[in-house]
């Protein structure tokens, strides 16, 4: 067990190092940060002095080594745009992203599962076909387009929901802020959550539908029906339960994806989370924020995979013996 | 009994009076973020515009951009090289400290220190002498008629506050610890900053102790940066915001058609122009080898005359642009209207090219930003198709500003053959244009650092030096006109237009749209 965990940990570290190297290489192609940090009239000498102070003139291996050693100590430096420590900025933005991701995942599950069950049980009905067509939209339309569509329908035309921001937020504890406790905060969550969760919702719905169709054909369901059990019991107790295993796995993995790829949704709705900050950083060549975000995202995936691996170890006895 | 009802009536009256003066909140959005609050960190229009609601300079500019007294009540040139500023008495910073000559001297030192991006506001050779608490002398080494032209954005800071909070050093991007002055603000202006979360929200509150009579009726201002154009416009149309800027030109009609909102448009000071590499002996990006076609004035004029500026104005800019014949807005130069563009003449352009030995045309690479100016990439595409008609084949390289500037500016080694750029003189004066764009430079950029094409005309250089020290306004404008004329005659640059400003505003808001694109809350009234 310890050997297995160590091996996985070692692999995880290699992955992180590779991501760091990729991120670092990428920054050399995004443009010149100094131009974004000073006004256009700033003289060449002053630009050069700033470049020197930032260490951008050092040899590339020196820069990379400095970057990795600092990142290993969770020191991502100071944001070029905001002149504040990157870790503070992330701490302020994390609640927004996590609340949005959580609500989207909830939306995807709460809406996706019943739709999937219905479509699985009544595959010929018109409603099921409607569900399938709607889900096609969810998969094929790009996120930003859905977002803008929703804004124009619900904010501009109907004026029911806000088009941007988090609404009023309430501080909880020393650094968390929540929009769950105010009316405007809850209203502001609706459109971004739907936009972000639509893809996952369709995914879950189609998954459940397919699994349902599969399970319903199995012998034990036929036996259950033969025993004269009521439909409700057969469908929900026996069939649904067995479809949920893959759904739970997928949902777990998708949660990581939701957090990591909230970027577009956050930009469309000006949602003050990490993804929005990342996109702004890209536009302004704010290297410290970009690198921290990429490493954070990589860390999230590596951590999820690591946990899943360890869980498999407990679930699947075959992993415990004789693997090199 | 009677007494009681009287009291009740009085109470009701008081309550009524209370609500009639209800608190007005102005909510607005801009496409970019307000980063650090340190007024010397970044020399950029939006930052200075925002901080100008909280901080003030010795001078300020009015609705028509004329220089007005602000923290200095008056000033005079007592000797040719000695300017005397009489400070306004009784002005207090938001923390209650008095504004005195000490603060002026301190601010001058700080704005010139290392890390300041506004160090050109006061020349390094200028000495500051405190005469008394409310009088300050600036001693120069030579005459300078435009000493105070940029002081409307050189904001005065409180010496005690800055020193007590260890913020004397200007917040520089290379700092590892946050500077107090970049997170907090303490000015003398009409609005205090109540809270500031960079990139998320900034809240301002009316300063009741402001020295000037408030013409606005705003109590609170909420600023949100909204980067996405569609979202920004939607937030205005839905009534969530009172004002958003800028708005895309293609959305102007929608905003005007919508009940309750209107698009405010006007000319901006920024001049958009094309420049050509006239320094290298062979262009970096061209099929002409061994010589540089842009060194020939005929070729430059041919390119100029091949461009149908009216078509760009109409089709690309949707009429939100003013075609320009010189490199500064005519609004900023008294003789600006005397200049006229070379007429659009593709046939003439072809003849000029043939005369120069390029009857079959040539190809050249063009650099263009795609997120910096209004419809910048579309302008370049239009130029490319117009030049194709006279045989000049353009290989367009349009990229985000971060990459574009890294390539074409000095730090990238002026790596361009043909480019589009925009320029607003920070001082709103022609000397800035001449010294930044039109003087000779060497390969490292010494001289005019933004003369990216590197053309060199000794006459313009000497005129620039004369303009710097000429006190007589008429003579000075004459010298400037001469320099512009040389540039025009030789087609050193191809000015295109002054792009327009477009702000989206709710109907119940009155405000002033200044041509320098600064948004000042003190001009706003909400009905």
Image: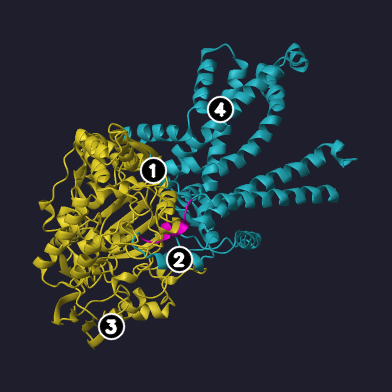
Q: Nearer the viewer, mark 2 or mark 4?
A: 2
CA separation, marks 2 and 4? 52 Å
Please, which residue is most extreme toward the bottom here? Answer: B132
Q: Which residue is mark 1?
A: B228
Sequence-first disc among 1 and 3: 3
Which dot marks residue B400? Answer: none
Residue in the image at 52% along x and 32% along y: A198
Chain containing the residue with disc 1: B
Q: Which residue is mark 4?
A: A202
Q: Secondary structure at mark 3?
A: strand
Residue B513 is covered by the magenta coloring:
no
Task: Classify 10 Å Cα crowding around label 4: few (below 14), some (14-19), many (20 and above).
Answer: many
Q: Secondary structure at mark 2?
A: helix
CA separation, marks 4 and 3? 70 Å
Q: Nearer the viewer, mark 1 or mark 3?
A: 3
Q: Position of residue B42 (x, y in %)?
A: 37, 63
Q: Nearer the viewer, mark 3 or mark 2?
A: 2
In depth, the one of B287 and B475 nearer the eye is: B287
Kindly indicate whether the residues beneath marks 1 and 3 are on one polypeptide chain: yes
Residue in the image at 38% along x and 43% along y: B228
In depth, the one of B490 and B106 nearer the eye is: B490
In depth, the one of B105 and B17 nearer the eye is: B105
Q: Which chain is yellow?
A: B
Which dot marks residue A48? Answer: 2
Q: Which residues are magenta?
A: A31-39
Residue A38 is covered by the magenta coloring:
yes
Which hue is chain A drawn in?
Answer: cyan
């Amino acid at each position: 067990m310890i050997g297995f965990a160590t091996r996985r940990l070692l692999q995880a570290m290699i992955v992180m190092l590779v991501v760091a190297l990729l991120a670092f290489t990428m920054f050399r192609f995004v443009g010149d940060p100094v131009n974004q940090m000073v006004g256009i009239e700033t003289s060449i000498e002053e630009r050069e002095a700033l470049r020197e102070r930032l260490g951008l003139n050092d040899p590339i291996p020196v820069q990379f080594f400095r970057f990795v050693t600092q990142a290993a100590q969770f020191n991502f430096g100071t944001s070029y745009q905001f002149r504040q420590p990157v870790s503070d900025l992330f701490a302020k933005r994390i609640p927004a992203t996590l609340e949005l991701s959580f609500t989207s995942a909830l939306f995807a599950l709460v809406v996706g599962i019943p739709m999937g069950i219905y479509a699985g049980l009544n595959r010929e009905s018109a409603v099921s076909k409607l569900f399938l067509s709607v889900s096609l939209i969810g998969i094929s339309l790009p996120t930003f387009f859905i977002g803008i569509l929703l804004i124009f329908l619900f904010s501009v035309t109907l004026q029911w929901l806000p088009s941007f921001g988090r609404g009023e937020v309430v501080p909880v504890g020393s650094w968390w802020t929540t929009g769950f406790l105010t009316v405007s905060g809850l209203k502001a969550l609706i459109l971004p959550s739907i936009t972000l969760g639509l893809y996952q919702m369709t995914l879950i719905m189609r998954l459940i539908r397919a699994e349902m169709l599969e399970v319903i054909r199995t012998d034990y369901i036929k036996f259950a029906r033969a025993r004269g059990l009521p439909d409700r019991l057969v469908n929900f107790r026996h069939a649904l339960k067995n479809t949920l295993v893959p759904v739970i796995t997928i949902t777990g993995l998708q949660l990581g994806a939701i957090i990591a790829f909230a970027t577009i949704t956050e930009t469309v709705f000006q949602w003050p989370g990490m993804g929005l900050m990342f996109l702004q950083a890209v536009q302004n060549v704010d290297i410290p924020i970009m690198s921290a975000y990429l490493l954070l995202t990589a860390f999230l995936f590596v951590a999820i995979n690591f946990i899943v691996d360890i869980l498999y170890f407990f679930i699947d006895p075959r992993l415990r013996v004789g693997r090199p | 009994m009677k007494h009681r009802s009287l009291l009740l009536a009085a109470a009701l009256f008081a309550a009524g009076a209370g609500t009639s003066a209800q608190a007005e909140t102005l909510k607005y959005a801009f496409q970019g973020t307000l980063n650090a609050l340190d007024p010397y960190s970044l020399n950029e229009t939006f930052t200075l515009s925002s901080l100008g609601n909280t901080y003030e300079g010795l001078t300020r500019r009015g609705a028509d951009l004329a220089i007005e007294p602000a923290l200095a009540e008056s000033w005079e040139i007592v000797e040719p090289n000695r300017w005397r500023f009489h400070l306004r008495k009784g002005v207090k910073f938001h923390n209650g400290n008095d504004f005195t000559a000490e603060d002026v001297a301190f601010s001058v030192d700080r704005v010139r220190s290392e890390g300041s991006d506004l160090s050109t506001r006061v020349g390094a050779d200028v000495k500051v002498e405190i005469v008394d608490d409310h009088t300050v002398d600036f001693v120069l080494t030579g005459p300078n008629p435009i000493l105070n032209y940029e002081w409307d954005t050189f904001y005065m800071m409180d010496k005690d506050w800055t020193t007590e909070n260890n913020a004397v050093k200007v917040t520089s991007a290379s700092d590892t610890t946050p500077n107090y002055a970049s997170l907090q603000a303490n000015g003398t202006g009409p609005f205090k900053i109540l809270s500031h979360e960079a990139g998320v929200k900034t809240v301002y509150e009316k300063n009741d102790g402001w020295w000037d009579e408030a013409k606005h009726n705003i109590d609170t201002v909420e600023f949100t940066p909204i980067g996405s154009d569609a979202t920004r416009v939607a937030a205005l149309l839905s009534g969530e915001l009172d004002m958003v800027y800028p708005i895309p030109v293609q959305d102007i009609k929608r905003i005007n058609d919508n009940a309750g909102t209107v698009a405010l448009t006007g000319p901006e000071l920024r001049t958009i122009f094309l420049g050509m590499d006239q320094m290298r002996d062979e262009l970096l990006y061209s099929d002409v080898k061994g010589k540089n076609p842009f060194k020939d004035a005929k070729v430059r004029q041919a390119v100029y005359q091949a461009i149908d500026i009216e078509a760009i104005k109409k089709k690309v800019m949707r009429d939100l642009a003013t075609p320009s014949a010189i490199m500064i807005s005519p609004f900023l130069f008294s003789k600006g209207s005397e200049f006229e563009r070379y007429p659009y003449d593709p046939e003439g352009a072809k003849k000029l090219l043939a005369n120069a030995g390029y009857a079959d045309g040539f190809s050249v690479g063009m650099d263009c930003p795609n997120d910096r100016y209004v419809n910048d990439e579309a302008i370049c595409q239009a130029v490319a198709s117009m030049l194709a008609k006279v045989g000049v084949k353009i290989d367009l390289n349009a990229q985000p500003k971060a990459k574009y500037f890294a390539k074409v500016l000095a730090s990238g080694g002026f790596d361009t053959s043909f480019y589009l750029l925009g320029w607003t003189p920070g001082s709103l004066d022609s000397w800035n244009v001449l010294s930044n764009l039109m003087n000779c430079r060497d390969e490292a950029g010494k001289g005019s650092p933004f003369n990216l094409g590197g053309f060199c005309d000794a006459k313009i250089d000497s005129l620039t030096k004369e303009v710097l020290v000429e006190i007589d306004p008429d003579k000075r404008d004459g010298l400037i006109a001469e320099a512009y004329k040389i540039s025009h005659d030789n087609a050193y640059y191809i000015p295109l237009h002054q792009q327009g400003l477009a702000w989206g505003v709710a109907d119940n808001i009155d405000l002033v749209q200044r041509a320098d694109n600064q948004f000042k809350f003190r001009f706003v009234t909400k009905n």
